[in-house]
Image (tube, helix red, strand yellow):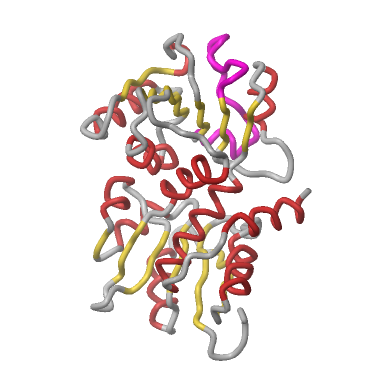
Amino acid sequence: MSEGSGADRYAVMGNPIAHSKSPLIHRLFAAQTGERLHYQALLVAADGFAAAVGEFFRHGGRGLNITVPFKQQARKISAALSERARRAGAVNTLMPDENDRLFGDNTDGIGLIRDLTQNLHLDLEGKTVLLLGAGGAARGVIAPLLAQRPALLHIANRTPFKALDLAGSFGDLGRLSASGLEDIPSLHYDLAINATAAGLDNEVPQLPQGTLAAETRCYDMVYADEATAFMRYAQRCGSRHTFDGLGMLVEQAAESFSLWRGVMPRTAEVIAALRKNTG
């Protein structure tokens, strides 16, 4: 049972937010697990985030997901942080801790890893991985990617210094290199992940010829009802394996749901239901 009077309240905050699939995902989780909750999408003014969070929890809210553009602000207002949120520099999950302080976590990285390894059955150990972008989306997944022990994680960004800065920040966790988009080393990349903001605008980063090969798994952290711009670009480059970020969205939501409710939903059937709903 997912709705009704007395149900625990949860929400996702962002701007824009009308497109969010999170309410549907959490309704499916609640129905599957028998958890009684109400989950809604809340549009928050650009200058009203901290006030909106405070009001939500003062009125009995139990947990929040945070999306663009508020993840860095969520980190700043958190009284305590998980290690993965500290490393990511951003928070996408908020809840009161045992002392009623605001606790911030980040489930984006584990969501990506579970989609790659459990749903898509990719083994990243010893592989060469290309990460496109050096903003918040990229930063949030670097530590979890390095925990999979790839041979190399190369970060490429339109402005090279941002990629170099990120590589320096995470160099203690594994083998990293960085460059501008036009200077990507000519290597065989087993996996290429698009974490650029361009994907949100239906644009793609232009890469040196040969960067994406037939056997390069090309993963776009953006999701859409049809192939994303990056997926289409990768296909034109010859890649035979392209994926969008819907699985990551569901997996990060499942991790948040587990933090809040103490039960991990089965994600495969929810991903399948969403694919069917949008296909």
Residue under the point 25% across and 34% down: 173
Residues shaded magenta: 196-216
Quarter containing the N terminus: bottom right
Q: Is residue 45 left or right of residue 271?
A: left
Q: Which residue sits at x=29%, y=63%? A: 78
Residue 153 is situated, as x and y percent measured from the top left of the image, at 37, 26
Q: Specify the farthest residue to the right.
A: 279
**Is 212 located above or below residue 24 in the figure?**
above
Circle count = 0
Give the dominant element type of the magenta stretch: helix, strand or loop: loop
**Residue 246: horizontal and vertical position, in percent?**
61, 47
Q: Is residue 210 magenta?
A: yes
Instruction: Name the side, left or right, on which 178 lies relative to 245.
Output: left
Q: Residue at x 45, y 43 (%)?
A: 113
Viewer-proximal residue among 177 and 135: 177
User: Where does the image place residue 23, in percent across and percent down from the top left?
Assistant: 61, 66
From where the camera sits, is residue 109 visible? Answer: yes
Residue drawn at the location 43% of the way across and 83% of the way down:
60
Q: Quadrant of residue 159?
A: top left
Q: Residue furthest left?
A: 172
Q: Is residue 52 visible?
A: no
184 or 189: nearer the eye?
A: 189
* Residue 55, position as x, y percentages in the image: 42, 77
Q: Quadrant of residue 125?
A: top left
For residue 263, side relative to residue 32 (left or right) = left
Residue 1 against residue 220 in the figure, above or below: below
